[in-house]
Amino acid sequence: MHVIAVIAAKGGVGKTTVTANLCTTLAEAGHQVLAIDMDPQNALRFHLSNDIQACESGLASALTGERSWTEVIQPGRAGALLLPFGTVDDQHQIELEQFLAASPTWLGDTLASFALPPHTIVLIDTPPGPSVYLQQTLRVTNFNVVTMLPDAGSFATLPITNRMIEKYCTPRTDFFGNGYLVNQVDPGKRLNRDILDALRTDLGSQMLGVVHQDQAVSEALASALTVRSYAPYSQAAQDFSECTQVLLQRLSVPARTDAPATDLSSATPTD
């Protein structure tokens, strides 16, 4: 099992969109994928779920015992599985965060208890900035996809993300490294080009790739389709495909050219 965290120091960078499109691109290429939403906004469901109402319950409900893990994990688009965060009120969220702070290995222990097929790729969407959810995720991730915009704000907040990575990931022997993905790039804007050039110079081989600004992304979401299904020849579809290929190379996972998208619905977690 490979665990990949999609993280960002600031909000509004398209982190959930990136998570969803990496998931569907991997699944459409035949890889076994489980998407986990560790963000209380519970927004990953809008990108991946075939039944949004079913995602009102999620890991928050399973953690309290209101639902079983089998009940809250939903079949998602392109053959992936989705574990939504679920909808919680403010009091339950506070209690959940207190539990996670007191149980630092909860996510790792929970993933270990799931009866997932071998070679499953787990992608975790996280809230922006430091949080107990990010701490839980960084303790188990093998690789981080650091998502940012080609703007001064993203560039300035990189040290915050890097400090978290150094604290929770770098000391672990099962941590492979980071890949930096620059999202919503508009080559027609000089500032975008200048910051992208600076990032490429600073990050070198750690650059995972670039996703250009493309209306097909929002149109696909509105149509409840993956970008590759909605506009297979769009710039965004090509960008996500290229980023996924680099990601697999970094993880030393071979491309699946002999299999269709894999449905994990037969692999249910233990309760």
Image (cartoon, helix red, strand yellow):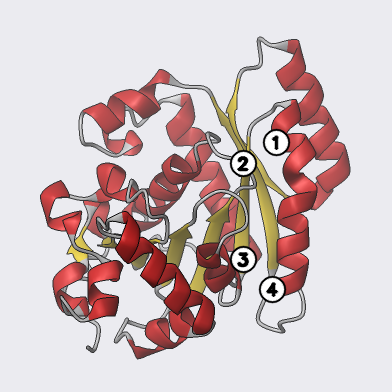
Percent across and percent down for residue 143 are 61, 66
Q: Is residue 253 visible?
A: no
**Residue at (52% x, 22% y) in the render:** 213
Precedes in sequence: disc 3 or disc 1: 3
Earlier-in-chain disc, 4 versus 2: 2
Which label sits on residue 154? Answer: 1
Q: Amino acid at mark 4?
A: Tyr
The residue indicated by pointer 2 is 10
Residue 81 percent coordinates (x, y): 26, 64
Q: Nearer the viewer, mark 3 or mark 1?
A: 1
Dot 3: within a 10 Å radius of its alpha carbon, few (fewer than 14), some, or many (20 or more) residues?
Answer: many
Q: Which mark is residue 143?
A: 3
Identified at 36% across, 48% down, the residue is 41
Residue 226 sits in which quadrant?
A: top left
- Pointers 4 and 2 in contact (CB under 8 A)? no
Taking 137 as reference, is 116 above or below it? below
Check if mark 4's residue and mark 1's residue have beta carbons within 8 Å.
Answer: no
- Is 161 situated left or right of 261 in this image? right
- Distance from disc 4 to disc 2, alpha carbons, whole Å, reads 19 Å
Q: Can residue 108 be seen?
A: yes
Q: Quadrant of residue 139?
A: bottom right
Would you call the spot at circle 2 few (<14 residues within 10 Å), some (14-19), or many (20 or more)? many
At 40% from the left and 19% from the top, the residue drawn is 215
